[in-house]
Image (cartoon, helix red, strand yellow):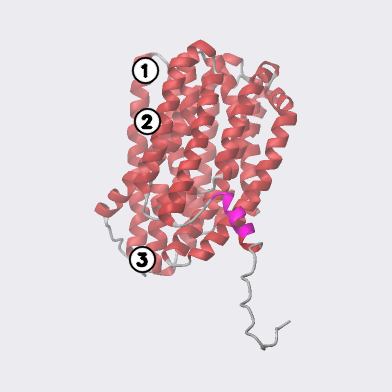
């Protein structure tokens, strides 16, 4: 419940941040911010190169085997890869944006690139903190940087100062930087004594081999979260992208529930699975699914009954996005009920299968958006996203059950119910002359 409370709080912070942005910006400027924010977040997630998942597996594996030099080396390797990849992608973004004429000012480019780098490190440090310090600390601070943006943008609006896309990225970079500094200080103090003051050991070849499927998973997840808004902005207009972005952010409440479930489950999947405690792992996932089912049901009722009022918070011009909000909410709700199938596959040695399943849905969504969105508007990407999300969720759960022997979805609750009401086996018939037991 604490894990889900953290995710709900993070979702509310996200909605508050974008609500303030939509209120203080003109629709065109907010649409531009939505496109830039999704593009930068997309690149930051790719720049992780799978290190945020790899460190969870590596740290658990090496500390259980008392290979503390390798555990420390895995952290150094992850930081190096993330920094190098983030700087490289920031350079690519700067060149591409300048060549295409997307940059309205040099300050925007600097702020966006800086946010890309610190956001990458922030996601990695949060996973390290969650693994070494504890779930509450790592997840509790993951989205705290949004407070800096909320307070800063509100203060500027109160002082009648203009809030632009550049301003939002600058405030975001400051917030994420402060979060990284705090997490790093606590991580260094919480690291086991055996990992301190000793030389690090490196197994780069094995880490690179493990990272590649996880990087592919990061790419697919980033595409699922951020690609639609970018393409809508290119195919339709910034205003259409801004409206879709608002609906997607509200529907993202269910993705936050799924994320909380996945992040909490990731800390126990690897230890229980590799420790041979499969029944305990399945029971833990059932408990998580029960909580998720309750939250998803409540969330769908709120969206269905109060969707118009939620959209009104962003401004009257966004109320007509209600149909898109409902369609996206169905897709994200089903994905949340599907459970942490991504971590079940990634942390048990089935990384490549996850990528194969998800890439099919991604290709179909992109094709539908590019071809049909100019004809029918932004509702097409919403329908395509939801359809592919449901299909992908079903496929991933089938793979988990068949190859791992674990059902991470809410359907595991039905199996538990069947087991509880299963009839007792019939007693053998008594032999002639033998008394019948009561």
Residue 251 vertical placement versus 51 (above, below): above
Which quarter of the figure is the C terminus placed in?
bottom right
Magenta segment: 409-418
Element class at badge 2 = helix
Quadrant assignment, res 81: top left
Inter-mark Cα distance, 2 to 1: 12 Å
In the rendered image, residue 371, in percent from the top left (x then y), is placed at 43, 16
Q: Earlier in the sequence, mark 2 or mark 1?
A: 2
- Within 10 Å of the Cα at label 3, are there few (<14), some (14-19), or many (20+) other Cα atoms? many
Quadrant assignment, res 360: top left
Q: Is residue 35 left or right of residue 10?
A: left
**Residue occupied by mark 2:** 90
Which quarter of the figure is the N terminus placed in?
bottom right
Q: List the single residue furthest toward the left.
A: 205
In the image, what residue occupies the spot 74% across and 29% down? Answer: 306
Q: List the single residue furthest toward the front.
A: 432
Residue 290 vertical placement versus 8 (above, below): below
In the rendered image, residue 374, in percent from the top left (x then y), is placed at 48, 12
Most foreground residue, 85 or 8: 8
| Residue 68 circle label | 3
Inter-mark Cα distance, 1 to 3: 45 Å
Residue 237 vertical placement versus 139 (above, below): above
Most foreground residue, 417 or 194: 417
């Amino acid at each position: 419940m604490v894990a889900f409370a953290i995710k709900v709080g993070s979702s509310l912070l996200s909605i508050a941040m974008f609500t303030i942005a939509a209120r203080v910006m003109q629709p065109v400027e907010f649409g531009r911010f939505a496109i830039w924010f999704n593009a930068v977040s997309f690149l930051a997630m790719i720049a992780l190169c799978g290190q945020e998942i790899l460190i969870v597996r590596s740290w658990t594996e090496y500390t259980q085997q008392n290979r503390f030099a390798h555990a420390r080396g895995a952290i150094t390797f992850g930081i190096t890869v993330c920094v190098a990849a983030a700087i490289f992608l920031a350079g690519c973004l700067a060149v591409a944006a300048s060549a295409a004429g997307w940059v309205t000012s040099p300050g925007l480019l600097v702020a966006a690139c800086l946010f890309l780098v610190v956001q990458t490190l922030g996601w990695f440090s949060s996973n390290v903190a969650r693994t070494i310090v504890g779930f509450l600390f790592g997840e509790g601070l993951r989205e705290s940087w949004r407070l800096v943006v909320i307070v800063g943008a509100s203060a500027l609006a109160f002082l009648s100062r203009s809030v632009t896309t550049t301003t939002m990225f600058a405030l975001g970079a400051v917030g994420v930087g402060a979060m990284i500094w705090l997490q790093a200080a606590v991580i260094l103090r919480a690291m086991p004594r055996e990992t301190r003051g000793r030389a690090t050991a490196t197994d780069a070849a094995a880490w690179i081999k493990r990272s590649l499927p996880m990087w592919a998973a990061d790419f697919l997840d980033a595409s699922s979260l951020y690609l639609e808004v970018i393409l809508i902005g290119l195919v339709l207009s910034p205003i259409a992208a801004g409206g879709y972005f608002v609906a997607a952010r509200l529907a993202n409440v269910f993705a936050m529930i799924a994320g909380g479930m996945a992040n909490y489950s990731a800390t126990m999947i690897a230890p229980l699975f590799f420790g041979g405690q499969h029944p305990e792992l399945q029971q833990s996932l059932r408990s998580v699914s029960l909580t998720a089912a309750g939250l998803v049901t409540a969330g769908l009722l709120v969206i269905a009954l109060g969707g118009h009022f939620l959209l009104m918070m962003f401004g009257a011009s966004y109320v007509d996005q209600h149909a898109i909000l409902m369609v996206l909410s169905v897709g994200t709700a089903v994905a949340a009920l599907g459970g942490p199938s991504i971590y079940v596959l990634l942390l048990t040695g089935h990384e490549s299968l996850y990528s194969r399943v998800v890439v099919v849905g991604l290709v179909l969504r992109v094709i539908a958006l590019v071809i049909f969105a100019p004809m029918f508007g932004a509702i097409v990407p919403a329908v395509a996203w939801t359809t592919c999300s449901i299909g992908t969720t079903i496929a991933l759960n089938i793979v988990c059950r068949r190859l791992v022997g674990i059902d991470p979805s809410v359907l595991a609750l039905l199996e538990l119910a069947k087991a509880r009401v299963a009839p007792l086996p019939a007693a053998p018939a008594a032999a002639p002359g033998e008394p019948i037991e009561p």
